[in-house]
Image (cartoon, grey):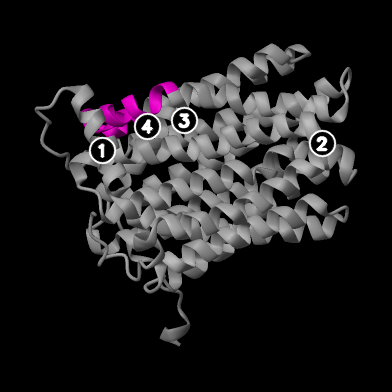
Amino acid sequence: MDGLVPTIPAPLLIRDYRAFWVARFFATIAGLMLVVVIGWQVYDIARATMTRDEAAFLLGMIGLAQFLPLFCLALVVGVIADRVDRRYIARAAVALEVGCAAVLGALALAGAVPLAALFVVAALLGVARAFQGPSMAALAPNLVPRELLPQAIALNSISWQAGAVIGPPLGAFLYAVSPATPYVVAAVLFAVTLVCLMIIRPVPRPAPSTLTPWRSLVEGIAYVRHNRVLLGAISLDLFAVLLGGATAMLPVYARDVLHVGVEGLGPLRAAPSLGAVMMAVLLASRPLKRHVGPVMFASVAVFGLATAVFGLSTSYPLSVVALIVLGAADAVSVFVRGSLIQLHTPDDMRGRVSSVSGLFISASNELGELESGLAARYIGTVPAVVAGGIGAIIVTGLWAWRFPQLRSADRFETQKPA
């Protein structure tokens, strides 16, 4: 009978990591509720006076509004994350998210949410993410022993992806109840996240650097630039997701292509995360140990193919399946990239390197939304999504040729800085 008792993953037996995991889970639910509702409201408001493709362009502009603060702050925040207690930075960022959700909730309760307010809040959420991302990424490795780090990274992915499965349909459902409800619930969930972060005890910190902040920043960029494995992994994700930004156009597909409305938007937005959760559970129980480079390239190619299939689909079930496959493939890439970054970065540089990685990831997501919006405006929404998927496949081939160190990477631990 003992063999039938589920084994609790070792990192979750650690009190502070458990609080971190729960905080990440609730923050993800709340954050993606806001993403879904803000995206739907922007598109819905715009469609009252614009064509489908013109309204899709505004979805791209929402991505730009979130990216600009990330671009301006991400690298500087990385330096701060290596000099200031990472718990304090994460707490401040979540407090800002509480305020953003509360403001939108108050506006919705008052009767209307102006389009301008949605753009301003999107930019403020970009500020919060700029601080929260590097600080929490750099905090996680301090909460578990090094030998448990790959398992903790997989559990981090489970936390994020499980929240991402719950958040979008919950946001859509609550929006159908009333426009204010998802914002109020998001504010409460962010408040719970803040409480979880508050109970994490002080963690070991690297000795203060004697370098100037600018020199520290330059060293973080240089470390990534000279490590061909890390540079290849981070930049592959950047360009593949930049081109394959299908999720940015989901409000368009839900309303005007698949005709399933806001109720259908939630499952569509959750489908990639559902695929990612299933893959993350598999990776947590059976961590990837061999052929990490080739597996990463294969996963990005599958991501591009699934994007193209989704773009062409006019069937709701097929679209959901394509997005599930897309999410599962992306989860493999995220796991490999995250493990390489954390295992091959000195602790005193983790904040800076995480901020560089975060900037690339943010560029791929938010600029991917901008690229999709621009392409939809000029060539149409469906051709833009299909072309993006094909482009991701082409990028995979180019990067496999350009970064042989990553292509031939076999194990995580044997990879050394180039």
Residue holding disc 3: 129
Question: For the residues marked 4 and 2, what is the alpha-carbon distance in whole angstroms?
Answer: 39 Å
Q: Nearer the viewer, mark 2 or mark 3?
A: 2
The residue to which callout 4 is attached is 90
Q: CA distance from mark 1 to mark 2?
A: 39 Å
Depth-wise, is mark 4 or mark 2 nearer the camera? 2
Can residue 155 be seen here? The reply is: no
In the depicted structure, whether residue 278 falls above or below residue 241? below
Q: What separation in Å lies between label 1 and label 4 (alpha carbons)? A: 25 Å
Residue 34 or 248: which is nearer the viewer?
Answer: 248
Crowd rating for badge 3 (residues with CA inside 10 Å; few <14, some 14–19, many 20+): many
| Mark earlier in primary sequence (4, 3) | 4
Q: Earlier in the sequence, mark 2 or mark 3?
A: 3
Q: At numbered mark 1, what does the secondary structure look like: helix, strand or loop?
A: helix
Q: Which residues are magenta?
A: 72-90
Please give the name of the residue rendered at 51% of the width and 70% of the height, measured from the top-left corner: 282
Q: Which mark is residue 380?
A: 2
Q: Which residue is mark 1?
A: 222
Residue 367: percent from the left, percent from the top? 58, 32
Quadrant location of the N terminus in the rendered image: bottom left
Label 1 vs 3, first from the N-terminus: 3
Q: Do callouts 4 and 3 mark residues in contact (Cβ within 8 Å)?
A: no
